[in-house]
Image (spheres, coloured by chain):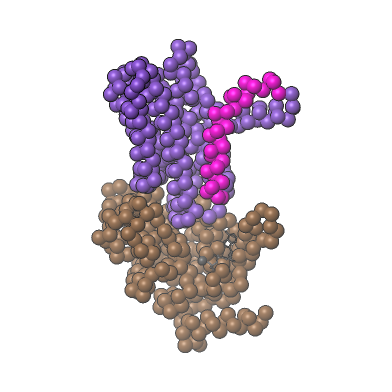
Chain colours: A purple, B brown
Amino acid sequence: MRRILAVAEYIFKQNFRNKILNVLIIFAILSIGFSLLISELAKEVEIRMTKDFGLFSISIFAFLTLVLSLTIQLFEETELKTISMVIVKPITRAEFIIGKFFGIILTIFMNILFMFIILMVVIKIRGGDPWDLKLFLSVAGTFLSLSILTSVALFLSVITTSIPGCIIFLFFTYILGHLTVHLKNLQYKITNQLVYKIIDILYIMVPNLELFNLKDKIHTNFSLFTFDYILLIISYSIIYILIMLILTVIIFNKKEF
Amino acid sequence: MNVIEAKNVTKIYKPLDFWKKEKIVAIRNINLEIKKGEVFGLLGLNGAGKTTLMKIFLGLLKPTSGTVRIFNDTIENRKIRERIGYMSELPYFPKYLKAYEILDYFADLFNIDPKIKKDKINEVLEIVRLSGRQNFKIKAFSKGMQGRLGLAQALLNDPEILFLDEPMSGFDPLGYKETRDIIIELNKKGKTIFFNSHILSEVEKVCDRVGVLHRKEIIDVQPIDQILKKHKNLEDYFINIINDEKVKK
Ligand SMILES: Nc1ncnc2c1ncn2[C@@H]1O[C@H](COP(=O)(O)OP(=O)(O)O)[C@@H](O)[C@H]1O
Ligand SMILES: [Mg+2]
């Protein structure tokens, strides 16, 4: 346990000391604060736009945080080679992977929290109510989907050897993850058996990130915000993450340095 | 008593790109025994396979065939890894972290008692002469200083065996002397030291025994005093033995 925490802390520190990540946070703040400039519209519309735009920024910048943390980690492992000195320590490779997972999601969590507080302040300034449960749940959804993507990122990092390759696959997963539901919904129109099957396979393998996309629904009455739904997406993420981490550890155990 | 053993160890690297066929034989049929308490230097030209052999001892690489034993056990065993220290070739560390933070991380990985952790870190910083620099970020460290930090992390657990891969590369002449003093000091405390080097003048001053790895095989292992009886220095011996091999082939 102590070793897992040590790895997590190390990765978190490294991410936070890295200047690129700080630049990213500044951009995030600017883009959330940007909505303060719009002022021609009716108050309701303004608040609504602020929320939409803020949630959208949070989800994008949270993803970029993951991409950057991954790059920092891969860089350290491939270029600095400190990893060989870590692996010979009395830590198991599973502990190392789990520590990395928590280190990265802790970074993302702190960034999201920070951006969320800024968003709440901006909403308050605009005269809206920042203590909105739906708002909170959609940010939590973003965090869950990023936890899943983090586990995918770790998996990709053990199966590919090149940094750009790994990042590109992560972007693909991100895009496909938001698309597969829509593909599935259109599937009945498809007659080609092969394409039909491919959609099925993608639907099962690629994480269904649209499940976590609550931000498009915050203004609707049709409520996705039921307890059952929340429970469903939490279980889905836990199962998906566990499978990914187990596969990652199996492959990582065979890896040579 | 042997603390490190290699039996018929061969390592063949897979081709670097999957479409290529030729495999790279890095070392072939290595047999080697290192005794408790000795300082053993493995010599060899660049690409001879020194790093490969060390990584196999450490479990970082798996031998294609043959077996290695550390303390008559496998390195997979966590308890065994608690008793060894390893410094890689040219260690580099993340540049935004402080030296102290890096050692703190490694101390946690060794599960060093939190009560003595701080003292332990200061102690190893003292040994490698980095005290006073512990709160500097790595960005402000030279290659040689990072090398010292690499040595420091390998000493945190008071290892019984120390594996050092080219410990002096990147160091200045004062660094050579300091590293040599550290090795001699540790050896006095009964530690076994296995290291790779091609800085022969230094090897000559610290080793009890040397082995020569040439063209993937160990061609000779001898106590240093035997060598110095027949040759004027280690360099003379090394050049001779490598040239003899050339003639044989
Ligand atoms: N990961 C690897 N994949 C393929 N070949 C390698 C790899 N690492 C080392 N080699 C090759 O194995 C040989 C021995 O390398 P190495 O053990 O690093 O030698 P040394 O440490 O003595 O300089 C070299 O020919 C090198 O090119
Ligand atoms: Mg080498």
Percent x, y of residue A130:
32, 21
User: What range of the chain is rendered magenta?
Assistant: A161-190
**Quarter of the C terminus of chain B within the rendering:** bottom right
| Residue A61 drawn in magenta | no
Left or right of B219? Residue A121 is: left
Q: Can you say whether A220 is above or below A10 in the image?
A: above
Q: Is residue B93 visible?
A: yes
Q: Can you say whether B116 is above or below B170 in the image?
A: above
Percent x, y of residue B187:
38, 69
Quadrant of the rendered image containing residue B171: bottom left
Percent x, y of residue A213:
48, 24
Q: Is residue A9 visible?
A: no
Q: Residue at x 43, y 35 (%)?
A: A62
| Residue A175 drawn in magenta | yes
Left or right of B140? Residue B72 is: right
Label total for image: 0
Q: Assign the magenta stretch its main secondary structure.
A: helix
Q: Residue at x 66, y 28 (%)?
A: A199
Q: Residue furthest top?
A: A221
Left or right of A39? Residue A169 is: right
Q: Residue furthest front?
A: A40
Choose between A211 and A11: the one closer to the eye: A211
Q: Residue at x 41, y 27 (%)?
A: A53
Q: Residue at x 52, y 43 (%)?
A: A167
Percent x, y of residue A231:
47, 20
Choose between A125 and B226: the one closer to the eye: A125
Choose between A202 and B135: the one closer to the eye: A202
Quadrant of the rendered image containing residue B141: bottom left
